[in-house]
Image (spheres, rainbow, N blue to C red):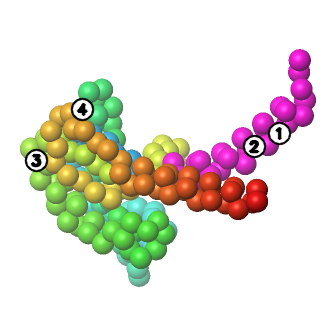
Amino acid sequence: MFNRTRVIVAVVALLAVLPGAAFLHFYLPRHDVVRIIGVENRRVDMTGKPLQNGDRPTQGRDVYYIFAEDVETKAPHVYRNEDTGWGFPFYLKFDSADEQAVAASIASEKGIAVVTKYGWRLNLLSWFPNAVNIRRSEPNPTIIPWFNIIFFAAFGAFAVWIWRRATR
């Protein structure tokens, strides 16, 4: 039998959980096994808009890009490679130039790499996931997402602790 209250509760619960799930999916690290095929350095203004020839802003920054393809499907992948610094998200990444050098070395060999990233690729908005770590790899590596396992275990333990304190 159709229970309208249960449907409303389920929809509200889903709407409450979706933003948190999207937040975690965007910021938690994920891994791609790709063949790196090229790298590029672009000069952008402080808003992130690429500079045209002749533009001379007072302030700007370099943004590194890594071009890759999926090892099996040959689907293209493009990664931004920027420092996160001390700010959010707290990856404390200060070595984007070094990571770019590793990526360039792997690209010259058309080698396979494991790219640890966060973020989404949205073509419409020209968003690229940020590569936080790049390392050489064999074609079929075993990847265990230790950070995500520990994060969700700690989150689950905290949720159980809160639930037990609330039900006393």
Amino acid at dot 1: Val
Amino acid at dot 2: Ala
Amino acid at dot 4: Val
> Which residue is drawn at the image coordinates 55% and 56% (left, top)?
157
Say what secondary structure mark 1 lies in: helix
Give how far apart the Cα atoms at labels 1 and 2 are.
6 Å
The x, y position of residue 125, in whole percent, is 52, 49
Give how far apart the Cα atoms at labels 3 and 4 are.
16 Å
> Is tag 3's residue or tag 4's residue first in the polypeptide sequence?
4
Crowd rating for badge 2 (residues with CA inside 10 Å; few <14, some 14–19, many 20+): few
Amino acid at dot 3: Ser
Label 1: which residue?
Answer: 9
Label 3: which residue?
Answer: 108
- Name the residue at the left extreme: 109
> Which residue is drawn at the image coordinates 78% and 36% (left, top)?
10
Do residues under tags 1 and 2 come within 8 Å of each other at their CB atoms?
Answer: yes
Magenta-tinted stretch: 1-28
> Which residue is drawn at the image coordinates 72% and 41% (left, top)?
14
The x, y position of residue 100, in whole percent, is 22, 60
Q: Quadrant of the C terminus?
A: bottom right
Rendered image: mark on residue 13? 2
Label 4: which residue?
Answer: 71
Q: Is residue 54 visible?
A: no
